Image (spheres, rainbow, N blue to C red):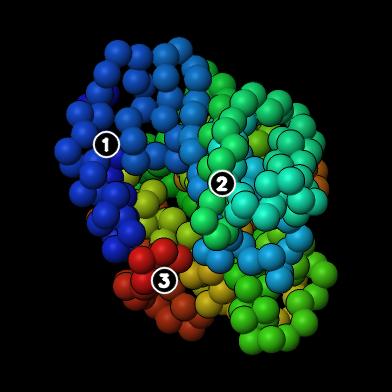
């Protein structure tokens, strides 16, 4: 397999496109090139990396150091879920300010990393520890296995788009924190404890025939644009169907454009609602599986709003670190 998987629009992704353009993208044993949620190496090894930086990805006035370490692992492992992989373990490179190296804050951050990977059924495989001039950071390399990787490419016109769980909870928590308001426990939990949908994604591949998918880290609209670009199709999202996190503070805007949901978006062959697959998923995982749109010929992401007959193109992307 040559080259890289096309990404959707956005300045952050322009930067990534720039470096991938100069990469060969091919090599012995490389089954899935860069541009997807993870790479797949011969025969079934799935590897992804995810960086969490204090002040950018988390703030220690929002969550404690143990929660911050655990959160970084949950977010990183979500990329394995996005590939339909089982978790083997993680390697974690940590940088701590001098004062934290031997202090409870640094120890709690590292214990959070270890505790979360073990709670998810994996092992801490290795890592590195160094000093940082100011902030805490951790780069988590997640390692998994799958014989049937779920890629961003493969969606076909006529497929239906389905999403696990609820959307917008984490982004709403961030908005409330930013406004100096108190954050309800259910929304705080959605931010501090991302749940990688590992078993759910494997089920969607094996039992529901998922053709393409990814995890929602940047917001449904932006991530759907990556699926559309990788699959060479257009996507129509239906606003009235989006499964908003059940709290009155959560808005459609946050469900569409908020980041950090870490749910899985998949393209399924049509008919999952009528043939009982969606209901079987709900029973198996006690988690909703909701049809949020359709795949059609064309490109990009459009939104069908309630009471309208034709969808409008969504020009805004999801969360973009370069915005
Ligand atoms: Mg991802």
- Percent position of residue 245, x then y: 70, 68
Residue at position x 45%, y 66% in the image: 319
| Circle 2 crowding by C-alpha within 10 Å: few under 14, some 14–19, many from 20 | some
- Mark 2–mark 3 CB contact (< 8 Å): no
Q: Which mark is residue 21?
A: none
Please give left or right for residue 176 compared with residue 121 in the image. left
User: Between tags 2 and 3, which lies in front?
Assistant: 2
Mark 3 lies on residue: 303
Q: CA distance from mark 1 to mark 3?
A: 28 Å
Element assignment for label 3: strand
- The answer to whether one can see residue 300 in this image is no
Q: In which image quadrant can residue 68 be found? A: bottom right
Element assignment for label 2: strand
Mark 2 lies on residue: 131
- Mark 1–mark 3 CB contact (< 8 Å): no
- The answer to whether one can see residue 323 in this image is yes
- Percent position of residue 143, x then y: 56, 27
Front residue of 243/220: it is: 220
Mark 1 or 2, nearer chain start: 1
Residue at position x 53%, y 77% in the image: 253
Mark 1 or 3, nearer chain start: 1
Element assignment for label 1: loop
- Percent position of residue 41, x then y: 42, 19
Front residue of 47/159: it is: 47
Mark 2 or 3, nearer chain start: 2
Mark 1 lies on residue: 4
Please give left or right for residue 111 compared with residue 164 in the image. right
From this view, report whether residue 232 is shown above or below residue 142: below
Q: CA distance from mark 1 to mark 2?
A: 34 Å
Which quarter of the rendered picture does the C terminus lie within?
Answer: bottom left
Residue at position x 52%, y 64% in the image: 56
From this view, report whether residue 166 is shown above or below residue 177: above
């Amino acid at each position: 397999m040559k080259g890289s998987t096309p990404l959707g629009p956005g300045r952050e992704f322009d930067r990534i496109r720039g470096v991938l353009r100069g990469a060969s993208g091919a090599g012995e044993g490389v089954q899935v090139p860069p541009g997807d949620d993870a790479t797949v190496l011969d025969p079934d090894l799935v590897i992804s990396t995810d960086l969490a930086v204090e002040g950018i990805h988390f703030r220690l006035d929002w969550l404690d150091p143990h929660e911050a370490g655990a959160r970084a692992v949950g977010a990183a492992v979500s990329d394995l879920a996005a590939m339909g992989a089982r978790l083997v373990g993680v390697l974690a490179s940590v940088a701590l300010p001098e004062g934290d190296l031997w202090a409870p804050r640094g120890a709690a951050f590292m214990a959070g990393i270890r505790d979360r990977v073990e709670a998810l059924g994996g092992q801490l495989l290795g890592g590195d520890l160094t000093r940082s001039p100011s902030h805490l950071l951790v780069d988590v390399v997640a390692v998994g296995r799958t014989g049937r990787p779920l890629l961003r490419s493969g969606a076909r016109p006529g497929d239906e788009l389905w999403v696990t769980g609820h959307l917008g909870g984490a982004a709403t928590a961030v908005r409330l924190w930013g406004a100096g308001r108190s954050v309800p426990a259910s929304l705080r939990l959605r931010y501090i404890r991302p749940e990688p949908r590992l078993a759910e994604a494997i089920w969607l591949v094996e039992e529901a025939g998922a053709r393409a998918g990814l995890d929602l880290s940047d917001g449904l609209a932006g991530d759907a644009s990556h699926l559309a670009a990788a699959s060479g199709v257009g996507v129509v999202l239906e606003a009235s169907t989006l499964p908003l996190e059940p709290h009155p503070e959560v808005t459609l805007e946050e469900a569409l454009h908020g980041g950090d949901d870490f749910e899985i978006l998949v393209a399924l062959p049509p008919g999952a609602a009528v043939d009982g697959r969606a209901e079987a998923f709900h029973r198996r995982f006690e988690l909703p599986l909701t049809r949020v749109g359709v795949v059609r010929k064309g490109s990009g992401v459009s939104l069908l709003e309630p009471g309208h007959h034709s969808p409008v193109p969504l020009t805004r992307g999801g969360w973009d670190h370069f915005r």
